[in-house]
Amino acid sequence: MATEQKGDISIRHSIRWIPSSSPSSSSDTPPPAEPTSTIVLTSPSGRFVDLRIFKEDPLSPNHTCVFISPNSHTGSETKAEEARTLPLSRLDWAIAGTSTHTSTRPTIGYYGQKLILPDGRTVSGTTADLKSGKHPYMRGRWTHWVDSRVLYTEAGGGPSPDEAAADEGDMYRIPGEGNEKLALEKGRMVNPESGQEEDYEEVWVPDEEGVAEPPYVNCVVWELDDKLKNKKGRIVKVGRWAQGILRRGNELLCERWKWVSGENEQSRWRLEARVKGYVGGEEKRKVDEKDGRYLDEPLAFPKALIPEMISVGELGKTNEVGDTVTESNGDVWTLVEWCP
């Protein structure tokens, strides 16, 4: 059954790492930057797909593009998709999981007659104001179901559900005119460059490019979970964006799609980026010793991804949670959520 809420699209504007030896106020703290194209698509129930792909030009202000070449979307569709296929070295992080957000009262300090909030703002008020929820913030927790930074050391191995990775952060509004739609996230996690746990600050913005959305439902979520093949994946479509993660052992495939339309564009779903490879280093696909054939087909998202899966809820279609799409290789994708 469809839910009445809407999904969420969050685009990261910047990230700043704050080493333990460098307090936030120190001039040694690096300025905010955005070396990746990071988009998080989240369903109303909290199912999300988070893809963070390194941009070719780290200084580019375009936060939704990973290509410099203006010709990356031209030519035949097959050649265009080949041009937008990237090695795993271009992937910063890919996560599928579940998020929860809880409103909570901030821990405070005092400066004169003002309250000091955790985001550094000073406001007039009393502890009674805080208890009444006048200055709340959100505590977010993201539990990882698929995580590109987790390396499986044994066939069929990997963390048990009770050992699933998770990260937490506190979400604040950013004061100041023009910042009403920005969100500041503060937390602590491993900095991949230093290998150490460090405080971080991320600024997130909504998707407001203004391009028309496809003429059907807001959010669709499909999942694959095949324990016999050690294979699992998720596809989330929200508005004009769709992202998918598919993993088999240490083999990983990630894709981002975008609905394009306009005077110079035929209205359609267009592959924006594909990243694939082996987590932890290159591996060889298993080969049958007798005839030399591959035992496993290469990872691929369903051929019915666009016509059947992303277009759930289109006029003339009847879809229910629990519907399945079965691929020729035996993969069974299940519709787990959708909302109008």
Image: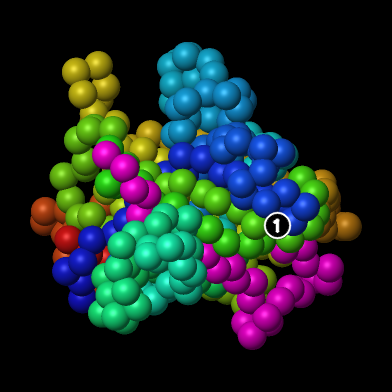
Q: Residue at x 46, y 67 (%)?
A: 110
Q: Tell me if I can see residue 64 in this picture.
A: yes
Graded by Cα atoms within 10 Å as few (under 14), some (14 to 19) or many (20 or more), the crowding at tag 1 reads: some
Report the side of 162 relative to 309 (left or right): right
Residue 136, given in percent of the width and then of the height, sits at 34, 70
Q: Residue at x 65, y 57 (%)?
A: 199
The residue tagged 1 is: 198
Residue 221, given in percent of the width and then of the height, sits at 36, 63
Span of residues in magenta: 150-177
Q: Secondary structure at mark 1?
A: strand
| Colouring of the image | rainbow
- Residue that lies at the very extreme toward the bottom in this rendered image: 162
Q: Residue at x 31, y 53 (%)?
A: 238
Name which residue type carries label 1: Glu
> What is the quadrant of residue 27 in the picture?
top right
- Residue that lies at the very extreme toward the left in this rendered image: 316
In front here: 140 or 225?
140
Q: Is residue 160 magenta?
A: yes
- Name the chief secondary structure element in magenta: loop
In front here: 99 or 293?
99
Q: Quadrant of the C terminus?
A: bottom left
Q: Quadrant of the N terminus?
A: bottom left
Residue 216, compared with residue 317, is above or below; it is above
> What is the quadrant of residue 88 in the picture?
top right
Residue 162, compared with residue 191, is above or below; it is below
Q: Residue at x 20, y 35 (%)?
A: 212
Residue 207, compared with residue 340, is above or below; it is above
Q: Is residue 265 magenta?
A: no
Report the side of 76 relative to 225 (left or right): left
